[in-house]
Amino acid sequence: MFVDSSEFNRIVEKYTDVVFRSALTFCKNMSDAEDITQNTFIKLLKSEVDFESDDHIRKWLIRVVANESKSLWRSFWQRKVLSFNDLDYEPEYIDSEKSEIFVEVMKLPKKYSSVLHLYYYEGYKCNEIASVLGISESNVQTRLMRARIMLKDKLGEAWI
């Protein structure tokens, strides 16, 4: 074990919700999100990274979630399963007024819902999202623009 147990426990307590919400946004399935969350913290436990700050830890965890989600998407099983209907969980940060927006965001293709989640819910900037997802900053901006257009078409002007 490379991270001491008290520091590991502190990180898990502080970031479990962020990691789980991110995983849920990426994979749109509660069971897969739980698996990704667990795998992310196992990777943390085994990591040899010297973290500079809590922000560095948070970014590292989100990057691991993105990579774990990509690995899951590449699997044969995941490509053959429709998972949004399995969603029976509404994250704590969603109140009743925003639940319609959340449902519509979750219905978007993964490449759009993931950038919306990272931008609006996690507060990442476009360049940070690009780094996390391994795509260009202009691609992030394009995805955000397209996702907003899709939501505007579904929800009307009121959501903006």
Image (cartoon, helix red, strand yellow):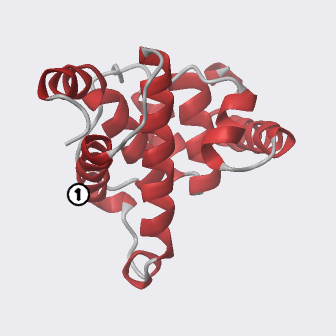
User: Looking at the image, how many numbered discs can be counted on the residues?
Assistant: 1
| Residue found at x 76% / y 41% | 140
Q: Work out whether 10 lies above or below 27.
A: above
Q: Nearer the viewer, residue 21 or 65?
A: 65
| Residue found at x 33% / y 60% | 85
Which residue was labeled with disc 1? 31
Quarter placement of the N terminus: top left
Q: Is residue 137 left or right of residue 160?
A: right
Q: Residues within 10 Å of mark 1 (few under 14, many from 20)?
A: some
Q: Work out whether 133 lies above or below 3.
A: below
- Considering the numbered disc 1 on the image, is that residue within a helix, a strand or a loop? helix
Residue 23, image x, y percentages: 39, 46
Q: Nearer the viewer, residue 49 or 126?
A: 49
| Image quadrant in which you'd find residue 118 | top right
| Residue found at x 58% / y 51% | 108
Specify the amino acid type for callout 1.
Ser
Q: Nearer the viewer, residue 4 or 59?
A: 4
Residue 144, image x, y percentages: 73, 37
